[in-house]
Image (spheres, rainbow, N blue to C red):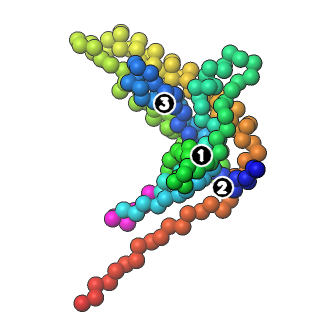
Amino acid sequence: MTKEINYPIKYAVLELKERGGWSAGYEDITQGFIVSKCYVVESNVVYHSDGTYTINHEVVFPFKDISAFKNSIGNVRQNIGVENIPHYDVCNRPYPINIVSDLFDSYESAKALAAQKNEEYKNNMFLRVPIARGETLSSLNWNERFDFLKKEFENNLELCNLFEQLVLAATDNMCISQDSTVKILKPIKQTNII
């Protein structure tokens, strides 16, 4: 028996990560940021003592397996992975979940944020270039390593953009929801009663 999926659908920025191996300390390695449609499962508003608030959304991205896509590049049919839909575990917690802070009604708005995040990631790349003892920033070795990382990032970003286009084509049947608004409560001003 198939059950209809009736979650709000929005655009969000997806950070594509690949599992890192021994050389990366087994940490996930960011490949780039793309725009994707997603199922909005939950939205949480966190209020702060200064009167501000932050909103976090738990979403499920239908496709996010960049590793399978990279492995299939040489094949005739490019594999973007198996489609994810929201599931619930025995404790009624949804999975597989990603947490995002921004949801968008239009692709263009989300693409602007993805481009900004990719640019920030590229600009912070020099922090990951190790400097050996006795080496300066003007050293040829450092510049070569930086150029290598920059070129590698640009190649990964090209793959990410191709992955984004294939995901958008695969999720073309998902219609963006218009009524998934989150109501923001304003704190009540307290009057001092003596």
The amino acid on which the numbered mark 2 sits, given as a three-letter code, is Tyr
Q: CA distance from mark 2 to mark 3?
A: 28 Å
Magenta span of residues: 49-54
Q: Secondary structure at mark 1?
A: strand
Q: Position of residue 191 (x, y in %)?
A: 32, 84
Q: Name, please, the residue furthest toward the top.
A: 140
Asked whether 78 falls inside the magenta stretch, the response is no
Compared to residue 1, the image places residue 52 above or below, namely: below
Viewer-nearest of discs 3 and 1: 1
Viewer-nearest of discs 2 and 3: 2
Asked whether 51 falls inside the magenta stretch, the response is yes
Compared to residue 131, the image places residue 178 above or below, namely: below
Which residue is labeled 3 in the image?
30
Q: CA distance from mark 1 to mark 2?
A: 10 Å
Which residue is labeled 2 in the image?
7
Q: Is residue 166 left or right of residue 67?
A: right
| Disc assigned to residue 60 | 1
Out of 77 and 189, give the one closest to the viewer. Answer: 77
The 10 Å Cα crowd at callout 2, few under 14, some 14 to 19, many 20 or more, is some
Looking at marks 2 and 3 on the same chain, the residue that comes earlier in the sequence is marked by: 2
The 10 Å Cα crowd at callout 3, few under 14, some 14 to 19, many 20 or more, is some
| Disc assigned to residue 21 | none
Q: Secondary structure at mark 2?
A: loop
Out of 112 and 78, give the one closest to the viewer. Answer: 78
Out of 127 and 57, give the one closest to the viewer. Answer: 57
